Image (tube, grey):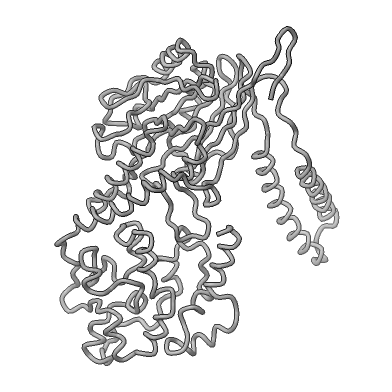
Amino acid sequence: MWYALPGIIAVLPHLVTLVATAEVKGTPEPCGCTSDPLGDVARVATLAKGGLWVDAGSLLYNREELSAERRPQADATAAALAHIYGRARVGLGGEDLAAGAAKVKPPRQACNARGMALEAPRVETIDGVHIGVFGVVSPARVKPVAASEPMAAARKAIAGLRKKGAQVIVALCGMDRGETRQLVKAVPGIAFAVVGAEVGDGMAEPEPVPSGDGTAWLMAPADLARFAVKLSIERRGEGPFVLYAGEAARKRAGEKADKRIATLQAQLAAWKKDPTADKAFVAARQQELDELVGERRALEGKPEPPPATGNWFSYELAPVRHVIARDADVAEELRKLAQTIGRVNVAAAKGQPAPAAEAGAPTYVGTAACEKCHKPAVEFWKKTVHAQAWKTLVEVDKQYHYDCIGCHVTGWEKPGGVNLASVEKRALVDVQCETCHGPGSKHVEEAGLDDPRTLVTRPPDRFCADNCHTKEHSDTFALVPYLRDILGKGHGEKARAALGNGPTGHELRQKALAAAGR
């Protein structure tokens, strides 16, 4: 696109892409159990291709999950993430320091930090636009690393970047939103500041903050690479940037309107059936709905063009979903990482004793022992997804991952159960009978005449949802539909009949996968 100006033949504006993550916390890809999982740095790499990729810190570890048992897996993951993000400019966060400052890689953008591998503020040239990148941290968030007062260090970094020809300044802030806001108010020159601490679900909209030389913009991605910030920047000359509500903003406005329309429609349907409802109030809500429907239609029209003059950017808090193609190189690295994690976990677990039961307490014995007396039930079980639980992990080389294994085997780290060193030896892979009914050794030893009874005939209704079928790992779970899949001839046939006809868990899952385009 060319613009003709008086006295000048033509000026070519530059549209560049910036993609930002923060608080990945040692999670390169999501659990694949949900119907439309969010996350995956291989997809983030695709978003950033051809543009500038930055991360505001806390890339490598999650302290809350850094037990001695999980340390080998966490270290292998951190090493892979450090290599993958070697192509990005990366700030510093507190989670990066979980294994000590000496192990933090790649070198970080943190202009006020000391005593670790650091990278000087850099100027990256993307499609002819010189983008200066520096990092700065809140000293309290990166202890025990020494860090000086951030504002003076930020001013110095910006001055140095300007001398190197930087036209746009991006700050990677190892701070929360309030701390970042204070920084950009006090330090002129920052165009875009990426929040790197306590980001949560990210910022759906960028926040304008008055600065000494105009307006700076705060933005935050979601943690665990679930949503990445994606900026499209067009610089035409000196001066601040204005937000252009482009396609991403139109989409957000449409989604917001759709939710409000659906709510109003449901409310109006109820109110119109209620003879006691205030007619004036109902009429006002109907008018609101009519206006909102009109606004929604307008959003479907031709979008407004970007500003004809000046610098502008568009903002998207981009969901990192499967519809984004995976970068082939990063995907291959993650495939190898899965295998590496398996090796290091198995090696570290070798020889570790299985969790012991108290004296006289029952232990886990496996479905083969159950089958001697309950063959019809076991035959039915073999046709359920529970009997394929281990296979689903083997297919993706994650059968030895601590993030996954607990919900795909029986008696995981329970008294009388198994750990990584013993699960295969004791044939307790898959979600077997004892997962729901409890350890069966006494029941087997006493030929089903154990008294008091040591097995649970029917687990509590919350058992599934409180253990493996959580919202984070089983987004379509509903107890009755899922019970329809695991009860039947030989295994709770009367209970299955009592449930009656209706959707099954399999049907809910398939519907959700289809809606997600998988």
Nearest the viewer among 235 and 192 is: 235
Q: Does the rendering let one see residue 100? A: yes
Q: Is residue 408 left or right of residue 12?
A: left
Nearest the viewer among 12 and 165 is: 12
Q: Is residue 414 above or below residue 148?
A: below
Residue 72 percent location from the top left of the image? 24, 49
If the image is split into quadrants, where does the N terminus sit? Answer: top right
Residue 480 percent location from the top left of the image? 53, 76
Nearest the viewer among 308 and 416 is: 308
Q: Residue at x 70, y 29 (%)?
A: 306
Q: Residue at x 23, y 53 (%)?
A: 344
Residue 266 percent location from the top left of the image? 73, 60
Q: Is residue 237 above or below residue 365?
A: above
Residue 368 percent location from the top left of the image? 28, 83
Can you name the residue that lies furthest to the top here?
A: 7
Q: Is residue 345 left or right of residue 108?
A: left
